[in-house]
């Protein structure tokens, strides 16, 4: 049944976001794996629409936060306001207290504001005025990021990037999908009429089912070999951490669930590996993100055990 939930979401999503089935599967895998998703691409290719689609199809409470240079941490987390009647401060939750958060153009905010999401993404809670407030379950952050060379951007630090399980790029649609977009109905109007195809409890069931999917010891050996190859590569400034390895397993399990299997295959690991690894590693030569060619070579160099 959890597999059917996933297929139901994908079928409906593909009717709104055209020609991006693989990217939608990766986004759903990230959500099932209880991770957070980073989408890096130029404006206008559907990054924001993807977040709206996922929230609408699963019936999640949704909030969009537009990150700008003057955004403050309190604008995300919330603020304590003095209540004259009680003579004490009362906490007013910010937009982060939602099931799905769209952090739109996250790298246009200052590092101080970006860091307001760190505790929320890792601990699924926020601390304000020495009080800890739990976040809803499920809790999922989709952040969009403009290319770093564009004006007015603040690169995300490594600690922030590591909070994202997967990074994807949507890219331009192919010719047939673009023509359907140009000739078809406005995507926002389609989205307004779209109803949820599953409920948040169904998402929780998918997350629990994915966590139970089998990963054999031989596949763990393969994952460790992949991690080791990144740490010993002269082309990389630093390799993947154990947390990245845990994320790789979680994402592979989620991908296997979407494929309708109760066990992980090497192909699942190879599919999600570039999206788990790319934003966590940088070139030893110029400090930029690793290229798809380097990631592909890493996969080819490590034999499947």
Image (tube, rainbow, N blue to C red):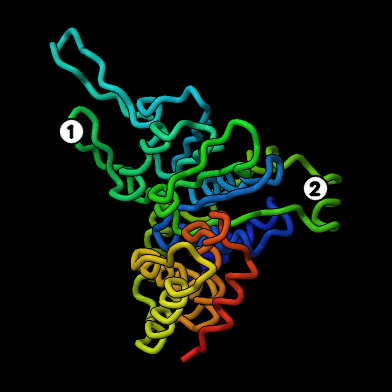
**Residue under label 1:** 131
Give the residue displayed 77% in from the left and 54% down from the top: 173
Q: Is residue 262 visible?
A: no
Q: Earlier in the sequence, mark 1 or mark 2?
A: 1
Label 2 residue SS: helix
Q: Name the outermost residue toward the top.
A: 84
User: Of the numbered discs in the image, which one, if any, rests on residue 76?
Assistant: none
**Residue under label 2:** 181
Along the viewing direction, whichever of 255 and 70 lies nearer the viewer:
70
- 11 is higher (above) or lower (below) than 219: above
Q: Does 294 sit left or right of 187 as displayed?
A: left
Image quadrant where residue 167 sits: bottom right
Along the viewing direction, whichever of 289 and 144 lies nearer the viewer:
289
Image quadrant where residue 127 sits: top left
Image location (x, y in percent) of residue 57: 55, 50
Image location (x, y in percent) of residue 185: 78, 42
């Amino acid at each position: 049944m959890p597999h059917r939930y996933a297929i139901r979401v994908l079928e409906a999503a593909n009717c709104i976001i055209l020609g991006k089935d693989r990217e939608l599967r990766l986004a759903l895998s990230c959500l099932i794996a209880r991770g957070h998703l980073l989408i890096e691409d130029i404006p206008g290719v559907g990054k924001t629409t993807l977040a709206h689609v996922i929230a609408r199809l699963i019936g999640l409470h949704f909030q969009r936060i537009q990150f700008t240079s003057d955004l403050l941490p309190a604008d995300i987390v919330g603020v304590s306001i003095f209540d004259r009647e009680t003579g004490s401060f009362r906490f007013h939750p910010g937009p982060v207290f939602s099931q799905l958060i769209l952090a739109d153009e996250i790298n246009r905010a200052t590092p101080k504001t970006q860091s307001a999401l760190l505790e929320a993404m890792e601990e699924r809670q926020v601390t304000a005025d020495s009080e800890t407030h739990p976040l809803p379950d499920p809790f999922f952050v989709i952040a969009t990021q403009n290319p770093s060379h564009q004006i007015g951007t603040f690169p995300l630090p490594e600690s922030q990037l590591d909070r994202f399980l997967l990074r994807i790029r949507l890219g331009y649609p192919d010719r047939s999908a673009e023509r359907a977009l140009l000739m078809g109905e406005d995507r926002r109007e389609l989205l307004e009429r779209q109803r949820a195809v599953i409920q948040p409890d169904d998402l929780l069931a998918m997350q629990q089912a994915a966590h139970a999917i089998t990963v054999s010891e031989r596949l763990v050996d393969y994952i460790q070999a992949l991690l080791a190859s990144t740490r010993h590569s002269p082309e990389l400034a630093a390799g993947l951490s154990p947390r990245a390895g845990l994320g790789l397993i979680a994402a592979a399990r989620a991908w296997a669930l979407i494929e309708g299997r109760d066990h992980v295959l090497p192909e699942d690991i190879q599919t999600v590996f570039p999206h788990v690894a790319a934003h966590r590693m940088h070139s030893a030569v110029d400090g930029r993100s690793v290229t798809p060619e380097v990631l592909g070579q890493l996969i080819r160099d490590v034999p499947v055990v």
